[in-house]
């Protein structure tokens, strides 16, 4: 096996949805770097139907043929505890969870069925919750962990026909930001990536020339870097694809201020709308403390202290 700087010897990494596309690329690279990999994949269709355990097994076979170590798991991420159990039973520890499994049930909102809505929440949000929740106590006990959520530009920006998927995908980043706060004292770091890549999920919606340039392997370096023990990033959101890697952050305007005692009307707000909207002097809050500080100043209470 080639030696590389970012090694994962003695580390155990769960990659969900690792039978195809991005997850497969992540799993192969982790294994090349010495990680023992739990290759999870339900082996279903892109819409979430069916099941085929040979999908995960074929990636494990590829890893083993290249001299790596991996175990296949065919459970749905909805049964996250079973995936974590497989990791503990086989390898005895969990260092990183790459939440990647996913499906699509695209439909315009007015045609979306309850089932299309619920299934997407169950697999993306519920699945990432279930796997991470089951891994969390092991990571806390070890004082170490790395978790990645796989979001999407559809969640960050919205995308026609993907209300269900957008909600789940940005929900994942909301969860990641809170887990980054809760995991901090236990050495657990949680980040979100929003990839763009050629895969089963995108082959029908992207032209061939675009698919050619968007290899899943061009997303994997970020999953590797953020999962490494030397990484200090947590609570961050990145976009990546086709050889481009970028970080996103929140931007908050200075905003308009009103006297809370006298209150203010919609007309007052309309008069101050430019202040609400102007990004001149905007700040980039890293957490909720600026919001609490500003609101506290206006109402005359130290909300940061009041919260404790
Ligand atoms: P893919 O279809 O090639 O791979 C997803 C894998 O997840 C499949 O092998 C599938 O069998 C597995 N899977 C589905 N439901 C599962 C479940 N309940 N339990 C376990 N495994 C399950 O798709 P791709 O593109 O590699 O997607 C990976 C992730 O990246 C997904 O979360 C997707 O939403 C996300 N993503 C992909 C983008 C792209 O451009 N390809 C864009 C934005 C996000």
Image (cartoon, rainbow, N blue to C red):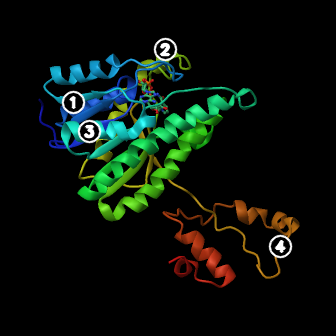
Viewer-side residue, 152 vs 184: 184
Residue 60 horizontal/vertical position (percent): 24, 24
Judged from the image, the secondary structure of the residue bearing numbered disc 3 is helix
Judging by the rendered image, the residue that carries numbered circle 3 is 87
Q: Is residue 285 above or below residue 42?
A: below
Whichever of labels 2 and 1 marks the residue nearer the N terminus, that label is 1
Q: Is residue 31 above or below residue 174?
A: above
Quarter of the image where ligand 1 sits: top left
Q: Quadrant of residue 233?
A: bottom left
69 left or right of 297 in image? left
The residue mark sitting in front, 3 or 1, is 3
The residue mark sitting in front, 4 or 2, is 4
Kindly give the residue lying farthest to the top in the view shown. Answer: 208
Residue at the spot 53% in from the left edge and 77% down from the top edge: 304
The residue mark sitting in front, 1 or 4, is 1
Judging by the rendered image, the residue that carries numbered circle 1 is 70
Residue 107 horizontal/vertical position (percent): 67, 26
Judging by the rendered image, the residue that carries numbered circle 2 is 208
160 left or right of 140 in image? right
State the CA–CA distance, disc 4 to disc 2.
55 Å
State the CA–CA distance, disc 2 to disc 3.
37 Å
**Quarter of the figure that contains the N terminus:** top left
State the CA–CA distance, disc 1 to disc 4.
62 Å
The residue mark sitting in front, 2 or 1, is 1
Judging by the rendered image, the residue that carries numbered circle 4 is 264
The residue mark sitting in front, 4 or 3, is 3
Whichever of labels 2 and 3 marks the residue nearer the N terminus, that label is 3
Whichever of labels 1 and 4 marks the residue nearer the N terminus, that label is 1
């Amino acid at each position: 096996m080639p030696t590389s700087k970012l090694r994962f010897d003695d580390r155990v990494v769960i990659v969900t949805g690792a039978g195809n596309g991005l997850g497969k690329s992540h799993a192969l690279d982790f294994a090349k770097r010495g990680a023992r990999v739990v290759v999870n994949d339900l082996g279903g269709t892109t819409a979430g139907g069916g099941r085929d355990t040979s999908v995960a097994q074929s990636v494990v076979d590829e890893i083993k043929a290249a001299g790596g170590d991996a175990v296949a798991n065919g459970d749905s991420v909805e049964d996250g505890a079973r995936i974590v159990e497989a990791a503990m039973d086989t390898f005895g520890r969990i260092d990183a969870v790459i939440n990647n499994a996913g499906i699509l049930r695209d439909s315009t909102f007015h045609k979306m069925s309850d089932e299309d809505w619920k299934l997407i929440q169950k697999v993306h949000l519920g699945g990432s919750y279930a796997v991470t929740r089951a891994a969390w106590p092991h990571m806390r006990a070890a004082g170490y962990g790395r978790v990645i959520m796989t979001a999407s530009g559809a969640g960050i920006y919205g995308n026609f026909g993907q209300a269900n998927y957008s909600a789940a995908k940005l929900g994942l980043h909301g969860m990641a930001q809170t887990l980054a706060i809760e995991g901090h004292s236990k050495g657990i770091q949680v980040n979100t990536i929003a990839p763009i890549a050629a895969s089963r999920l995108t082959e029908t919606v992207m032209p061939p020339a675009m698919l050619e340039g968007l290899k899943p392997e061009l997303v994997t370096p970020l999953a590797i870097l953020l999962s490494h023990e030397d990484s200090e990033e947590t609570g961050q959101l990145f976009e990546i694809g086709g050889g481009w890697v970028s970080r996103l952050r929140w931007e908050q305007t200075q905003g308009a201020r009103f006297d809370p005692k006298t209150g203010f009307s919609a007309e007052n707000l309309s008069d101050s709308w430019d202040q609400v909207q102007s990004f001149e002097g905007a700040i980039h809050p890293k957490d909720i403390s600026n919001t609490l500080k500003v609101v506290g100043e206006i109402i005359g209470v130290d909300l940061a202290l009041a919260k404790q």
